[in-house]
Amino acid sequence: MNIVDATATSIRSDIAAGRLSAADACRAALARIDAVRGALNAFNLVDADRALGRAEEIDRRRASREPLGPLAGVPIALKDNMNVRGMKTTASSRILEDFVPPFDATAVRRLEAAGAVIVAKTNCDEFAMGSSNENSAFGPVRNPWALDRIPGGSSGGSAAAVAARCVPLALGSDTGGSIRQPAACCGVVGLKPSYGRVSRYGLLAFASSLDQIGPFARTVADAALALSALAGADPCDATTARQAVPDFTAALTGSVKGVRIGVPRAFVTEGVDDQVRRAYQGALDTLRENGAALIDIELPHAKYAVPVYYLVCTAEASSNLARYDGVKYGYRSPRAKDSLKEMYSRTRDEGFGPEVKRRIMLGTYVLSAGYYDAFYLKALQVRTLLRRDYDEAFERVDVVAMPTMPTPPFKLGEKASDPLQMYLGDIFTVSANLAGLPGISVPCGFSTDGLPIGFQLMGRMFDEATMLRVADAYERSTEWHRRSPTL
Amino acid sequence: MPTTLTIADVERIAALAQLELTEEEKHLFTKQLADILHYAEQVQAIDTSGVPPTDHVNSDQRTEREDEPRPSLSTDDAIANAPDGAPDAGLFRVPRVIGG
């Protein structure tokens, strides 16, 4: 098999067994990136020298029989909103175009400690704000399955990189679906862990009560392998949980016998494309045929998840992005030399793109005097009601299943002029972030014109293991994840 | 009460957010923000009496530690990315704040 088609699991075992060198795996990834880079625009930065140096170090360790980590020699790409010391982090924004971070993100440190080889930083929506990757200052990423379609967002470059066989694993961040939705658009697996499972130290903050780092992969087993390496408490991120981290790979038994799957039928209705509905129903049928029980559940407040999400995330973003002021790092407007206030406001107007400004404005509005109670506080209260809906559902079921996205990936530009229409497409993904729950998108079909469709499983808080077991069992009885785009 | 926005409202919010918007942006945002806020008003009809707000899902977790000095970024590293740093003085330089 071609190296670029191999999973992380098999690359690691081939390297450990001496059948493959980490340097060859790295060179194969770099060559593939080079071949598709122009067509996809999925990469903001490729650091071949650093990557090859790290890969040769893995080969040296193997030659001298030193222990190898669980991701030894696996090429990996990172969304360009997490820090690698000495490598630019831009968040696909003009305001950080030349920012070179002085420290590693904890997720990066853990991956490298496990032996992973970082080859590239991937394009994304500016500051992870978007559902189509059209908000990047460096131009949109294109979907490897159809170059005129969105790859999803905001982690579109990471999803496209895995789908196009550039790397077997990539990291994204998910604030309202930014891992799961692009995974569905690109026909790959995308995992958002429970809130607090993976440290965000070194991740550029968008909405701190929602942001979570997670992996993209072509199989559930690879996503589980990556999560085992990433997860765990971190003294540098006070929001990380102290829960024990299980061996997620060991949880993949292949069986769903007796697993209770919650199906929110009343919620999965309006605005869902017929082909998505059929693929979702097909996935439920497969799980039932494998011995799972389908149980109808009600999520009465799920229909409010989009307005609640956009009130909460913009409020937090308006605060988090106040740090970009042209003083400590990043861009400063050359037009403002006379006053500090003018320097701030011109720098921010020139440095931020339209969607980021729109969200800062919305967040500033909902936090301002006279509107705080009616919008922001109200949203936080409805967030509690939504969490209670899930708490009640999880008394009766082990996982919840729903589509990841209401439609197949749409055309670039199709929704770009109507932000509200774009936001409505996040209906199935934002709940997991508001409630803190883990979620995973798994390929479950293709539209008649060959576009990938995914469905989503959500688990109990800190029970990624059960969710991954169901996702893996589904994947084992289907072939959708084996298809690859022709590029 | 439906949310209405005027250009003056948008200018007031932009000032709070330290954003100098162009005239075109002000007009665009006046309409787009009003549309989004109008849509978000649906949450106001939900009965939330006695419901506590969720600002954070793991907020019961205590993460206090002793307040002790630890190694951190050097001044040089902290200033290295500044658009107008003064490494010799160990300072960030900004336009004049008072006087003239």
Image (spheres, helix red, strand yellow):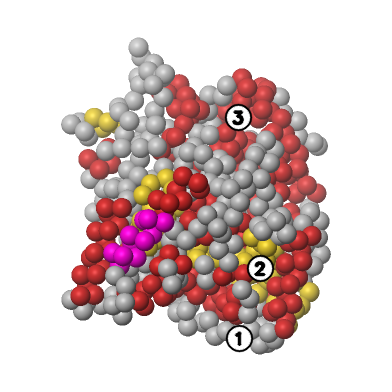
- C-alpha distance separating marks 3 and 1: 54 Å
Give the SS element for disc 3. helix
Q: Image height check: is A284 above or below A407?
A: below
User: What is the number of the mark on residue A255?
Assistant: 1
Quadrant of the image occupied by residue A287: bottom right
**What amino acid is labelled 1 in the image?**
Ser
Provide residue A459's location: percent of width, then percent of height: 61, 72
Q: Residue sitting at 31 percent across and 53 percent down? A: A48
Provide residue A264's location: percent of width, then percent of height: 76, 68
Quadrant of the image occupied by residue A485: bottom right
- C-alpha distance separating marks 2 and 1: 18 Å
Circle 2 residue: A444
From this viewpoint, which residue is outermost toward the top? B100
Asked whether residue A396 is in view, the answer is: no
Q: Residue sitting at 23 percent across and 45 percent down? A: B74
Q: What residue range appears in magenta?
A: A22-32
Instruction: Look at the numbered discs 3 and 1 and tell me whether their residues touch, using CB distance below 8 Å.
Output: no
Q: Image height check: is A30 above or below A3?
A: above
Circle 3 residue: B13
